[in-house]
Image: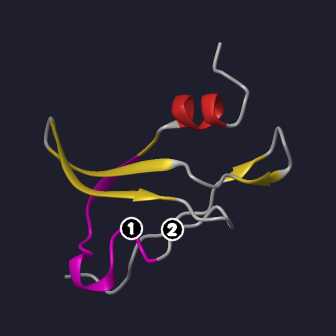
Amino acid sequence: MADGYLTTHVLDTGRGVPAAGLGITLYRIEGDARVKIADAVTNADGRTDSPILPREGFAAGTYELVFDCGAYLTASGTPPE
């Protein structure tokens, strides 16, 4: 196990504010497969309340964060094109 954890900070640069309420899914890439390991939603500061992948679950590897931007943009009044 590696010593670390995974967090993110999301900013809505179009509106100049943190991206609050943005859904995020974390996957671990294992060969050709994506294994879902966590879901999170950003808080008012555009961060998650706790690490998406905490220290006890962290391991060296390849990960993918998927941000649900379409739902976020629709909810903020700027639907995706």
In the foreground, 15 or 36: 15
Q: Left or right of 42: which side holds 10?
A: right
Q: Position of residue 4 (x, y in %)?
A: 37, 82
Question: Vertically, is 38 above or below 25?
Answer: below
Q: Quadrant of residue 72?
A: top right
Residue 74: x %, y % from top left: 62, 28
Amino acid type, label 2: Thr
Which residues are drawn in magenta?
Answer: 50-65
Q: Going 64% across and 61% down the picture, which residue do you hit?
A: 46
Q: Which mark is residue 48?
A: 2
- Label 2 or label 1, whichever lies nearer to me, is 2
Q: Which residue is mark 1?
A: 52
Please give the name of the residue rendered at 80% of the width and 54% of the height, measured from the top-left corner: 17
Secondary structure at badge 1 equals loop
What number is the disc on residue 62?
Answer: none
Q: What amino acid is at disc 1?
A: Ile
Say if the magenta span includes residue 51: yes
Among the 4 quarters of the image, the one containing residue 37:
bottom left
Q: Are discs 2 and 1 less than 8 Å apart at CB?
A: yes
**Looking at the image, which is closer to me, 64 or 68?**
68
Q: Residue furthest right?
A: 16
Dot 1 crowding, Cα within 10 Å, few <14, some 14–19, many 20+: many
